[in-house]
């Protein structure tokens, strides 16, 4: 199994826009090569996390080894690396691509090229991949293969004349895909006799095996029992298992050059396994590591607090468990006057944030409050120091700030002509700067620079709504740039409520401050005294609302002497208080935070 010569190995990934059929095609390939029995084929093998399946998205990179007897009579080893399909996980795409020599570019023949197709295909081109265009869904009456071929040539600049036309759904021409893999993609290069160099592609925690590491061997061999060294940390481990995914985990004796598979070594935490690291032999180490890839950095942060303070420990344990399988997720303890003890958490993007939040509530049964997401600002002080700000509440006093920089993204938006106007309006409302606008048929492709801060709130939802769902969107981080940013504090009877403070561009500060005050006015119940709700920049109030006093005592109506009724009423109030947060004398219900934070500020 492992003595397949290099010429008969093909390592490939499938790149596609969401819903163009990547997972369906992967399943067909697994089925066609008989890697799994019909009984083992669950509906979609590769998307194996519940949330992934429900949302129809792929998050974690997965690999599968397939054996294919080609028309030339030879048996080929095909290693498929699945790649995530969402912009938040672009980083995982790049590392999957680094482990392969070629890509299948799957385009839905009824939809055509989308923004994400472009982003992924450019990454594949950067990784020097040979790319085979595949037109999927040609069974659909709306399929227009010729138009889409032309589009691939015009927009991407790839020759699409011999694109493979398939229907992953019906299984039409899956053979054509397998033949294209064998005949059109190059075999990997490598030297079995050189010192071991294996790329650490991914790692995750398995309850029984400890950390499982996904590797791609470049040179040398990985064997069971071998002592290996992580080149970035110097940590040494004895390999317990070496194996491949078919997609079941099957142990093998060794993995040679060009091969992909997994290793285990009783490693306790994924934090010790840096993605992009080079694994070498401890006794005969390589001198130079492989070119790694940049570590993923969280770009969006928010605070997560348990609704019930007693759940704090449970939250800590749950976060630790999630982190075991997701090295790109970060968290650290934080306290808030408003919300008590919680954690500041960092994510790759908004979808990543939502997924983690959803898993915490679903798998760990936690009721949480999330503070408004914030990007990472660079605060330059007058004394020349710079620090990264993850929490608006930590913003230093304006008098010590020289200037602040915010992160910008480069966004590509593809949209039918009819909706272009509203999309452009949306981008300029969000302080976008247009850098390019081109047409492909009746679809426009707009390239914008946008502040990430304007995108994390609700940009994607707004884009979908102004284009009736027809716009597709992709982005990558661009540069940091100086901007006129201010921190807006929300004060309740002159007490600042830290969890509600946020950072915005000065031009939008007043509008957003006013919106929050208005919202809070409706959400905070009247109390026995007047409550002032203010939004302020430093000491300057920019918006104000007042909640009038409540004159009646709640128990007043019980003065008939019915003591049990009175007690019941007080009990009920006490229950309610658990869900309140005290500010000076003012009690703010939990629901007010939730609603205030949810709004599209
Ligand atoms: N008619 C038709 N439908 C297809 C074909 N291939 C896939 N589909 C359908 O298209 C939808 C999306 O397919 P998936 O394979 O889940 O798409 P994907 O690209 O993997 O999506 P992500 O995992 O979100 O990246 C599913 O409802 C499939 O059944 C095809 O050849 N013809």
Image (tube, grey):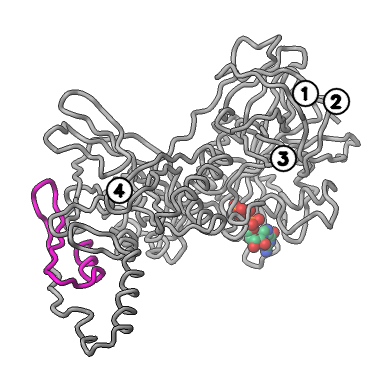
Task: From the viewer's perspective, tell me whether residue 311 is left or right of residue 522.
Answer: right
Query: Residue 256 bears which disc, if any?
Result: 1
Of 551 and 463, the residue lying toward us: 551
Q: Is mark 3 within 8 Å of ligand 1?
A: no
Q: Give the range drawn in magenta.
A: 516-545
Q: Is mark 4 within 8 Å of ligand 1?
A: no
Residue 194 falls inside the magenta stretch: no
Dot 1: what SS?
Answer: loop
Label 4 belongs to which residue?
336
Q: Nearer the viewer, mark 3 or mark 2?
A: 3
Q: Residue at x 72, y 19 (%)?
A: 190
Q: Which residue is drawn at 59% across and 58% down?
A: 56
- Image coordinates of residue 234 in percent, x first then y, are 58, 16
Label 2 belongs to which residue?
3
Mark 3–mark 2 Cα distance, whole angstroms, equals 29 Å
| Residue 89 drawn above or below residue 45 | above
Mark nearer the N terminus (3 vs 2): 2
Mark 4–mark 1 Cα distance, whole angstroms, equals 53 Å
Q: Are marks 2 and 1 in contact (CB under 8 Å)?
A: yes
Mark nearer the N terminus (4 vs 3): 3
Mark nearer the N terminus (4 vs 2): 2
Mark nearer the N terminus (1 vs 3): 3
Label 3 belongs to which residue?
208
How crowded pointer 4 is (Cα within 10 Å; few <14, some 14-19, many 20+) is rated as some
The image quarter in which residue 288 lies? top right
| Residue 426 drawn above or below residue 298 | below
Mark 1–mark 3 Cα distance, whole angstroms, equals 26 Å
- Image coordinates of residue 343 in percent, x first then y, are 40, 45
Dot 4: what SS?
Answer: strand
Q: Nearer the viewer, mark 4 or mark 2?
A: 4
Dot 2: what SS?
Answer: loop
Q: Do the residues labelled 4 and 1 touch (CB within 8 Å)?
A: no
């Amino acid at each position: 199994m492992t003595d397949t010569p290099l010429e008969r190995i093909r390592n490939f990934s499938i790149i596609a826009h969401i819903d163009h059929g990547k997972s369906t095609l992967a399943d067909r390939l697994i089925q066609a090569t008989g890697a799994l029995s019909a009984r083992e084929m669950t509906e979609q093998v590769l998307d194996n996390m519940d949330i992934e399946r429900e949302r129809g998205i792929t998050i974690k990179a997965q690999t599968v080894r397939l054996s294919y007897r080609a028309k030339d009579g030879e048996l080929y080893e095909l290693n498929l690396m699945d790649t995530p399909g969402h912009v938040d996980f672009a980083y995982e795409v790049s590392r999957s691509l680094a482990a392969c020599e070629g890509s299948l570019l799957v385009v839905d023949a009824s939809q055509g090229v989308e923004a994400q197709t472009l982003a992924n295909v450019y990454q594949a081109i950067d990784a020097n991949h040979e790319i085979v265009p595949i037109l999927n869904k040609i069974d659909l009456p709306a399929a227009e293969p010729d138009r889409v071929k032309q589009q691939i040539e015009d927009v991407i600049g790839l020759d699409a004349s011999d694109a493979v036309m398939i229907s992953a759904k019906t299984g039409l021409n899956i053979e054509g895909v397998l033949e294209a893999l064998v005949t059109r993609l190059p075999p990997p290069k490598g030297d079995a006799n050189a010192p071991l160099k294996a790329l650490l592609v991914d790692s995750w925690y398995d309850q029984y095996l400890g950390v499982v590491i996904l590797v791609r061997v470049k040179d040398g061999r990985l064997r069971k029992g071998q002592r290996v060294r992580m080149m970035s940390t110097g940590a040494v481990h004895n390999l317990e298992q070496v194996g491949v995914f078919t997609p079941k985990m099957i142990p093998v004796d060794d993995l040679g050059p060009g091969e992909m598979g997994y290793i285990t070594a009783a490693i306790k935490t994924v934090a010790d396994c840096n993605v992009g690291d080079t694994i070498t032999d401890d006794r005969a180490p390589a001198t130079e590591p492989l070119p790694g890839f940049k570590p993923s950095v969280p770009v969006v942060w928010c605070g997560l607090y348990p609704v019930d303070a007693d759940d704090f420990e449970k939250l800590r344990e749950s976060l630790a468990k999630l982190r075991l399988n997701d090295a790109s997720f970060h968290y650290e303890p934080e306290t808030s006057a408003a919300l008590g003890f919680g954690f500041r958490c960092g994510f790759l993007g908004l979808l990543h944030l939502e997924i983690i939040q959803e898993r915490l509530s679903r798998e760990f049964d936690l009721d949480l409050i999330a503070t408004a997401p914030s990007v990472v600002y660079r605060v330059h002080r007058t004394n020349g120091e710079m620090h990264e700000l993850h929490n608006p509440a930590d913003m230093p006093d304006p008098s010590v700030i020289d200037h602040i920089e915010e992160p910008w993204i480069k966004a590509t938006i593809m949209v039918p002509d009819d909706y272009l106007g509203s999309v452009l309006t949306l981008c300029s409302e969000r302080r976008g700067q247009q850098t390019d606008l081109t047409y492909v048929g009746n679809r426009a492709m707009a390239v914008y620079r946008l502040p990430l801060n304007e995108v994390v709130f609700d940009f994607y939802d707004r884009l979908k709504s102004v284009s009736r769902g027809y716009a597709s969107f992709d982005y990558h981080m661009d540069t940091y740039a100086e901007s006129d940013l201010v921190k807006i504090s929300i004060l309740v009877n002159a007490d600042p409520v830290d969890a509600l403070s946020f950072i915005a561009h000065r031009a939008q500060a007043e509008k957003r401050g006013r919106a929050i005050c208005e919202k809070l006015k409706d959400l905070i119940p009247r109390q026995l005294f007047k409550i002032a709700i203010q939004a302020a920049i430093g000491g300057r109030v920019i918006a104000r609302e007042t909640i009038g006093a409540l004159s009646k005592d709640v128990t007043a109506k019980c003065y008939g002497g019915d003591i049990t009724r009175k007690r019941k009423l007080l009990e009920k109030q006490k229950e309610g208080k658990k869900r309140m947060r005290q500010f000076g004398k003012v009690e703010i219900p939990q629901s007010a935070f939730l609603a205030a934070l949810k709004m599209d500020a």
